[in-house]
Image (cartoon, rainbow, N blue to C red):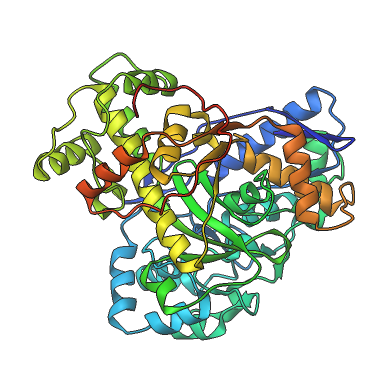
Amino acid sequence: MLGTFTDGWLGLQQIHRFPNGPFYFDEAQRWELPRIFAEILTGLRKTTAIRAMVDSISVTSWGVDYALIGEQESLLALPYHYRDPRTEGSYASVMDAGWADLIFSETGLQFMPINTLYQLIAERQANPARFDLVAKFLPIADYIHFLLSGVLLAERSLASTTQLYNPRTQSWSRPVIDTARLPERIFPNLVDSATRIGALRPGIAAETGLGSIAVVAGCSHDTAAAVAAVPATGSDWAFISSGTWSLLGVELSAPLISGQVRVRNFTNEAGFDNTTRFLKNLVGLWLLQQARKELAPKEVALDYAALTQEATGAPALRSLFDASDPRFGQAGDVLEKIATWCTGSGQVAPQTTGEFVRSIFESLALLYARTLAELEHILERPLRVVHIVGGGSQCDLLNQMVANATGRIVIAGPVEATSAGSLLLQAVALGHLKGSGSIRDAVRNVVRTSFPTRRFVPRDTALWVEAARTLGFTLPAPLPAPDPAPPSVEIAPAS
């Protein structure tokens, strides 16, 4: 994605897009990292071909996964994908060993088997000889930064997803590393968001034609970059970064680590400008992605817009499931799992494409609403606006459902929030974007100027409260309606 920043306005231009997902290799789910890097270089060459004048480059990625580097700075093995089941044993062993109190007090991070901590323990247990060869561990985006610049560093927002990082000290957690019997030498130096870390390697500079441009660690974690680009004002707002995963939370000035936070399984991750992203990781549109794969062999292939249109005409609030149940985070047979849940709870099981898609959307909206209620309880204050950013913000049907279920104003957009955040943090790092007050406000002012948003007002909240009882959910306490109520985006009748 090419960004152009001029007179307080950011323009985006997509240069190159390519599929990216796990593949099965050597008895495990892994990432084709060499192919991913080759595609990145293709994008850089295309940028040169359109005669763009480029100042810098920065990379974002998903969290928790990593690359292991040997003494000669070579990749020791293709990185594992976080959904590979190898961590089931290592996660259970850590819980059985009674380390959870120490880990949470040090990291404040949500417990999930996919976290880097359990991946590294599983790696050490399965391949002790290879693990002895590790010189450095690098999160995925920071490994790409290394390939581009030759600089071995990790940026804090991505490091904070590992459950090996202490958000209070803003450093790797020595107690957790020692308890897990991991070598401290493999953990790289850390840098803040929006740090210029080096220049493009000479070979890549020549091969792509870009020259010696700056390599910047913006927010290496994609959600951190997206939250930096939330077009919010004030402090009474929450965000949902909506994509394969849904990340629902708020931005705080400091970590919030307590027994209640642990019981409710919220997490503290680092954000731009020394902030904390206090959030919960939820299953997201991965459910729709899996359902689409299963529906494709049976019907004419549908794009997401067509799937949403099918759902618009389906019966409302008839087939609901608890999307937080672990079975819905596992690959395979998602349609069967939904139907089985509905039948087992005395509901009508979905039959058609539209009914399945509507079941997914409504169940996600109710999960978001329940999580928002938990968040407000922890914070002891109401959150009046929900900002939805990322790819999922394109779905107006789901946006309206979230407004209905939460009883809150929903503001959707920008879609490319991660790219916008990453590009604007490069502008900050290079001194092109400055603020007389908060630099975060300066970034968000640009986002509000540059990208349209859509506003959704709650409707039929009583119907959603009743539907939530089907799942045993508690929804957020109702707030007074805005006066006068602005028009809502018209989506579907009744709900």
Residue 131 position, x and y percent, is 47, 71
- Whether 368 is drawn above or below 97: the answer is above
Given residues 82 and 488, the one toward you in this image is 488
Asked if residue 396 shows in the view, the reply is: yes
Given residues 185 and 6, the one toward you in this image is 6
- Whether 313 is drawn above or below 29: the answer is above
Kindly identify the residue that appears in the image at 39 percent across and 49 percent down. 369
- Whether 456 is drawn above or below 299: the answer is below
* Quarter of image, res 483: top right
* Quarter of image, res 153: bottom right
Residue 234 position, x and y percent, is 68, 53
**Left or right of residue 100: residue 185:** right
Kindly identify the residue that appears in the image at 41 percent across and 74 percent down. 260
* Quarter of image, res 123: bottom left
Asked if residue 162 shows in the view, the reply is: no
Given residues 212 and 100, the one toward you in this image is 100
**Left or right of residue 92: residue 455:** right
Kindly identify the residue that appears in the image at 69 percent across and 56 percent down. 146
Kindly identify the residue that appears in the image at 35 percent across and 29 percent down. 495
